[in-house]
Image: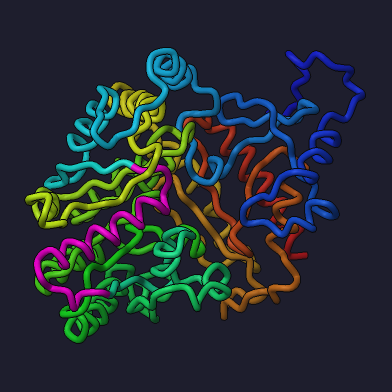
Amino acid sequence: MIRDDHSKMNRPPTLDVNATLRERDLAANWHPCTQMREHATRLPMIPIVRGDGAWLIDANGKRYLDGVSSWWSNLFGHANPRIAAAIADQAATLNHVMFAGFTHEPAIRLAEELVRIAPAGLVRTFFAGDGASAVEIALKMSFHYWHNHGQRQRTRFIALANAYHGETLGALSVSDLPLYRAVYAPLLFEPIVAPSPDWLDAEPGESADDVAARRLRDMRDILERHAHEACAVIVEPLVQCSGGMRMHAPAYLTGLRTLCDEYQVHLIADEIAVGFGRTGSLFACEQAAISPDFLCLSKGLTGGTLAMSAVLTTDSVYQAFLGDYAANNAFLHSHTFSGNPIACAAALATLAIFREQPVLENNRLLAARLAQRLAPLREHPHIAGLRQTGLIAALDLVADKQSRTPFPAAQRRGLRFYLHALERGMVLRPLGDTVYFMPPYIVTSEDIDAMVDVAIQGIDKAVA
């Protein structure tokens, strides 16, 4: 049920605290992924003062279901008491110590637990601050590995069309979304771009596995020409999230691992968005029964409570950086807050919930409910490409269903949908005209019903 919440708000109910906070914010802050002028005009900022499970509560007491998990990071709800207690306990003991030359038990325990649950062969953990930083680390480690082995001609990376890996310069270089990349193109290195195995690109009569097989043939051709100069192939396993929630079959990952082994290039799995249960398994790579050479993790690692990331890699990679000081072959990459004890405590509490509760089983039930509720939209005249992997579902608003012709971008149909959802207490922030659902794992079936009901209304309003 969507309701306002004025409890614990020591203020007159007629005072518009939201307006005051918006004014202060616009005078001081610059927000990400935002045309700031719109926040002063048609798209007022929403000041959030409290979280309650799957819900966010603004300064005037209005409640919003967080249908996108606060940029795909929140797993077990806002203000989760177990994670909050772990953070508070650690903050009262040790806030931070630099991770060069020092260590602490929270980081040791977290590395041990990540190695225990990760795909086989990933035995070393390098901590950093956010997802893009993890991608930067994986790219640099792969390049440096080949450098240390004397293969200094390997300076390039192979990425997929429609990929997104972050917005630092290295991560942006292996991304393929013009919206983010175009302005900075003179600053970026050029990847070798392979066709995406997106199953929406199926030809008549093709299955998702058929698309995967066709795109693996394309990848083989690319590796045949470029393996000698390539460090690694980087992919988002199963779902290309920022690229419009494009999805592919596990068979693509299985075949890609084989090709990377055959042509002796590394495989980097960017599971920053899809890791920790989003796709129906703890890690997306599990569904293809593969282990990458580098596994990038963030977002859900701390349950969405604190910024933290990790790169897991193999002992073979680790050994390539060992030697005498004079050899100058160490990995000299650092972040001030690498291995932060408070973030480690949050991550340990998050992983304990996975260990002790039937999270994945419950997610599959929620995913089935979401699929059931969305199924009738397959017949909607302005919806194409309804798709789902685990607890991630998406659809595209289109002008013509048969040809999948999009609406003119200037019409901003997705924004119409977003504003409608906000009015009705739902945070469903689309990617252009791609509507998607990625709720926290603690939503109820009733929450899903309410979310989809509002979405259906919003879709009809957006395409009218």
| Residue name at image x 35 percent, y 28 percent | 97
> Going by the image, does 202 lie left or right of 370?
left
Q: Residue furthest right?
A: 14
Q: Whole-percent x and y of residue 101?
A: 23, 33
Q: Whole-percent x and y of residue 247?
A: 40, 62
> Going by the image, does 281 lie left or right of 371?
left
Number of callouts in the render? 0
| Residue name at image x 20 percent, y 75 percent | 154
Q: Main secondary structure of the magenta part?
A: helix
Residue 350 visible: no
Q: Quadrant of the N terminus?
A: top right
* Vertical comparison of 171 with 271: above or below: below
Give 63 or 33, whichever is nearer the viewer: 33
**Magenta segment, which residues?**
128-155
> Going by the image, does 327 lie left or right of 55?
left
Q: Quadrant of the C terminus?
A: bottom right
Q: Whole-percent x and y of residue 228?
A: 16, 80
